[in-house]
Image (tube, rainbow, N blue to C red):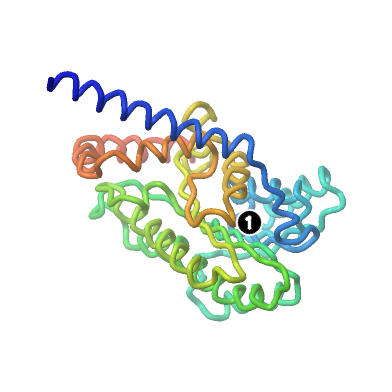
Amino acid sequence: MIDKVALIIGYGFLSYLLLQILIILFSKLFLKKDISKCYGKGTWAIITGASDGIGKGFAFTLAKKGFNLVLLARSESKLAQTQKEITQIYPSIVVKYIIADFKNSTQPEFIEQIYKQIKDLDISLLINNVGVASIEPFCETTESKIHELFVVNMAPQVFLSRKIIPLMLKREKRSGIVNVSSMTGTCPLPYDALYSSSKAFNDYLSRALSIECHKKIDIISLRPFYVSTKMVFNREAGIFTITPEECAEGCLQDLGTHHVTYGHYKHAIQGFVWDIIPKWIVIRLMHIIGPIISKDYKESISKFQ
């Protein structure tokens, strides 16, 4: 009798898993959404950290959908190159850029200078993407790195949102904000304490504002797993790793219908499995593999640089 009950429970659980995966695949692959119609074709999207990685992926994806762009990053040469690449493919799109080193984003004049250059635009989308990573034991992290990580990962999302949300509230159409968090922000991770806690901040800020501003603005927290960017040393896209464009496309399809998303269907499936794993198991595993991951990360940095 006990064996039969266990078998029924097992089959039921497997059926549930399969059903959820099929729902994810159907919603991601077949339920397409025209975001230019939702937020206004020819309006402006502001993207931070736009010269590389996920930010650049959002830039190309939004240009393809008919949005004009303001790109923010610290490297003028990379910004100019990204501007050139986009306008060559999408000549009807206007692409501007602002040089911004977000290590200075807690300084009032820093955000004010950005605001002066965008306040007269019809801003329909804000992509709060800029961020830096660190995977190492807390006591081995330098104070300068800690300061950079917390300032860059959190302050821009707060201060840019505070400046741009009032402009969005005046628009006739709806507007949208994407706050790039991470799957690491869903669980306290030893040996990744600083980065995961900063991403938890991004996630909570986004989810709270999505409720507060829901009448006029769609706000979503993006929690990707591995994306092929410099942050993961340009890891090749595959079963578990996606391209920046896939990350952007998957997220934008959920903007307006979800408060949180893992983005692309590959990450959505990983996220579904991640969410049902008891987090005490994850934390126990990190006690074992955390030092190994931290060591590999440091070695990868030295090789990549």
Q: Which amino acid does the dot numbered 1 rest on?
A: Ser
Direction right: furthest residue: 92
234, 283: nearer the viewer = 283
On the image, which quarter does residue 109 sit in?
bottom right
Task: Please say if 295 is above or below 135.
Answer: above
The residue labelled by disc 1 is 75
On the image, which quarter does residue 98 sit in?
bottom right
Task: Please say if 170 is above or below 132.
Answer: below
Q: Which residue appears at 53% of the width and 29% of the height?
A: 236
Image quadrant for the N terminus?
top left
Task: Please say if 239 is above or below 291.
Answer: above
SS of the residue at dot 1? loop
Residue 250 drawn at (x, y percent):
58, 43
Q: Is residue 164 left or right of residue 179?
A: right
Q: Which residue appears at 68% of the width and 47% of the height?
A: 33
Residue 293 drawn at (x, y percent):
31, 37
Residue 245 drawn at (x, y percent):
63, 41
